[in-house]
Image (cartoon, helix red, strand yellow):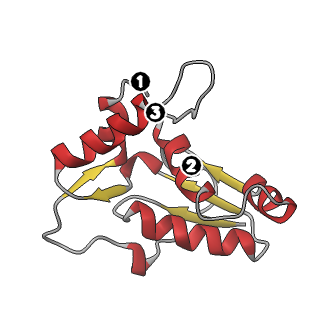
Amino acid sequence: MKVYDASGCIMGRLASHVAKALLNGDEVHVVNAEKAIISGARHSVFREYTEKRQLNHERKGPFYPRMPHLMFKRSVRGMIPYQTPRGRAAFKRLRVDIGPAGEDAPETIERAQMTSGTVHVTLGDVSRKLGAKF
């Protein structure tokens, strides 16, 4: 089982790395999902995620989550063929948590780390703006 720390990592880069590991057959556990970073200006990121959330119909969907760990899982789901048996099996091997790791020491992915000076918002801030309580 691979344990990754999402704090300080750009969400899309980390999600693509996790998706590739899942499709290779590894079990992946991501911790500190609320500390993942979305690059971009604060108001434009908030507007984009608010529009995604308001796009749905309350009974018919599409249902877009507001909790940070579920938002991260949704971004990984978009990078795997989850409607095929191989993709479903890979998606079931993914576990994402809010907060620190339990017994295993998480590793960080250097390619996914944010460079200094980038305008960004954390995933926790976005989910709080959408109304999540964690």
Above or below — where is 112 with respect to 36? below
Q: Secondary structure at mark 1?
A: loop
- The type of residue carrying mark 1 is Lys
- Are dots 3 and 2 in contact, CB under 8 Å? no
Q: In this image, 15 relative to 53: left or right?
A: right
Q: Say which residue label 1 marks.
A: 133
Earlier along the polypeptide chain: callout 1 or callout 3?
Answer: 3
Name the one closer to the observer, 48 or 40: 48
**Mark 1 or mark 2: which is in front?**
2
Q: Say which residue label 2 marks.
A: 74
Earlier along the polypeptide chain: callout 1 or callout 2?
Answer: 2
Disc 3 packing (10 Å; few <14; some 14–19; many ≥20): many
Q: In this image, 121 relative to 91: left or right?
A: left
Residue 36 visible from this viewpoint: yes
Residue 106 visible from this viewpoint: no
Q: Position of residue 11 (x, y in %)?
A: 42, 60
Q: Say which residue label 3 marks.
A: 66
- The type of residue carrying mark 3 is Arg
Q: CA distance from mark 1 to mark 2?
A: 18 Å
Residue at coordinates 12% horizontally, 70% vertically from top-left? 117
To which quarter of the image does residue 21 belong? bottom right
- Are dots 1 and 3 in contact, CB under 8 Å? no
